[in-house]
Amino acid sequence: MVFTQMMEEGMANQIQPATSTRWVGWVLSGLVIVFLLMDATMKLLTLPIVLEASGALGFPGADMARALGILLLICTLLYVAPQTAVLGAILLTGFLGGAVATHVRVGSPLFTHVLFGVYLGVMLWAGLYLRDSRLRALVPIST
């Protein structure tokens, strides 16, 4: 009993991040959140640039842009809420994977277009990892 309690306390101390670590996590997450909210808003407003870019990628029409905007907004809001952040991150990873696949299909430039979704996904998960002790407990990374 005492050993178990000592182990639990020791594990709890290992996975509690420093305040600066949490701040860095929220800054990374904040950058991703702001970008995704801006992207979702532009899709929902069906701005001409969105329709033009979407059409070139094979997603014609305002209805498709709005549907993608709604989907992106829901996933992003799930990511924002600490209780559902992991679910939001998983769903956003799928969304970003679709973006990567789309850019590969149309032959977009690798480092600027194709891998942009990967860059965003890495920031998304890194931010969540730094700010969420549950994720650190699930996926411990030792140095």
Image: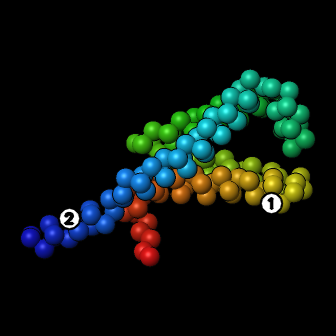
Asked if residue 51 lies left or right of residue 141, the reply is right
Question: What kind of element bears circle 2?
Answer: helix
Residue bearing mark 1: 111
Image quadrant assignment for residue 100: bottom right
Check residue 78 in the rendering and tell me which mark sits there, or answer none.
none
At x 9%, y 70%, the residue is: 1
Q: Residue at x 87, y 57 (%)?
A: 109
**Does 87 sit left or right of 106 as displayed?**
left
Q: Nearer the viewer, residue 83 or 64?
A: 83
For marks 2 and 1, the one nearer the N-term is: 2
Q: Which residue bears the numbered disc 2?
A: 9
Work out whether residue 52 or residue 126 is closer to the camera in this orientation and state it.
126
Q: How many marks?
A: 2
**Residue shown at 82%/33% (left/top)?**
50
Measured in 3D between alpha carbons, the distance from the residue under mark 2 to the one under mark 1, in whole angstroms, is 44 Å
Mark 1 Cα within 10 Å, few/some/many (few <14, many 20+)? few
At label 1, which amino acid type do we have? Phe
Q: Amino acid at mark 2?
A: Glu
Q: Residues within 10 Å of mark 2 (few under 14, many from 20)?
A: few
Res 101 visible: no
Q: Position of residue 76 (x, y in %)?
A: 57, 39
Whether 91 is drawn above or below 16: the answer is above
Q: Residue at x 42, y 42 (%)?
A: 82
* Quarter of the figure that contains the C terminus: bottom left
Residue 53 to residue 92: above or below: above
The location of residue 97, given as percent across then percent down, is: 69, 54
Q: Is residue 102 visible?
A: yes
SS at circle 1 = helix
**Left or right side of 87 for 65:** right
